[in-house]
Amino acid sequence: MSDELIETRATYDVIAPEFAKVVATGYPGLHQDVARMREAVGPQAWVADIGCGPGRDSALLRESGLRVVSLDLSEGMLRAGDLRGKVQADMRALPLRGGSLDGIWCQAALLHIPRGYAPSVLAGFACVLRPGGRLHLSVAAGESQGWEVAENYASPQRRWFTYHTRPGIEALLTAAGFAVAEVREHEHHRSWLTIAAHTAI
């Protein structure tokens, strides 16, 4: 595992309780995004919440009628929430069968992956989705990457952040085998790109 991910995981293990409190209310549009996923994949579909944290979004996805497996690299984050079907896993090597999922939800998690790993991570997402499977992906908008102190969670520890431009993330998704259906830009503490995409049918 890279040094960036080792340190970022250690930070999340420490800040998990505070993180769970801060993010509990969600972001503007969260419920609409969950509804979009539910509409795209249908009832009782299997969705992986990759980088699930304490499970806020997993719970909403499950409440909408979806079957959810929740994955996160940080054991502390998994312990911080009341999660069913939780798995400690690295998104660069998903412990899932090819074509086993109807949807992937990756909200504000790819942003911690160093840029060089992004192509293989997205290719891995495409691999575990069935034909026509849906991806909800939210990334921080920008061009830089580097360390940021987790001050908003009352911690001096660092997390790695990788920002993506709209053309850049669209190109990565296309190269991984996705068709981009929609890109929305919004502000919530920082600038975000929220992308809906699907694999080929």
Image: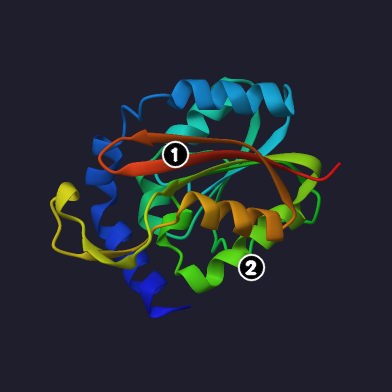
N-terminal of the pair, mark 1 or mark 2, is: 1
Between disc 1 and disc 2, the foreground one is 2
Local packing at callout 2 (Cα closer than 10 Å; few below 14, some 14-19, many 20+) is some
**As drawn, 91 above or below 64:** below
Q: Secondary structure at mark 1?
A: loop
Image spot of residue 149 (x, y percent): 19, 61
**How many angstroms separate mark 1 from mark 2 (CA)?**
25 Å
Q: Secondary structure at mark 2?
A: helix
Q: Is residue 152 visible?
A: yes
**As drawn, 167 above or below 149:** above
Can you say which quadrant of the picture contains the C terminus?
top right
Local packing at callout 1 (Cα closer than 10 Å; few below 14, some 14-19, many 20+) is many
Q: Could you say which quadrant of the image residue 41 lies in? A: top right
Q: Say which residue label 1 marks.
A: 55
Residue at x 37% of width, y 73% of height:
4
6 relative position to 37: left or right: left
Q: Which mark is residue 97?
A: none
Image spot of residue 194 (x, y percent): 49, 39
Q: Say which residue label 2 marks.
A: 120
Residue at x 24% of width, y 37% of height:
22
Query: Type of residue at label 2?
Result: Ser
**As drawn, 70 above or below 68:** below
Image spot of residue 146 (x, y percent): 30, 69
Residue at x 29% of width, y 50% of height:
16
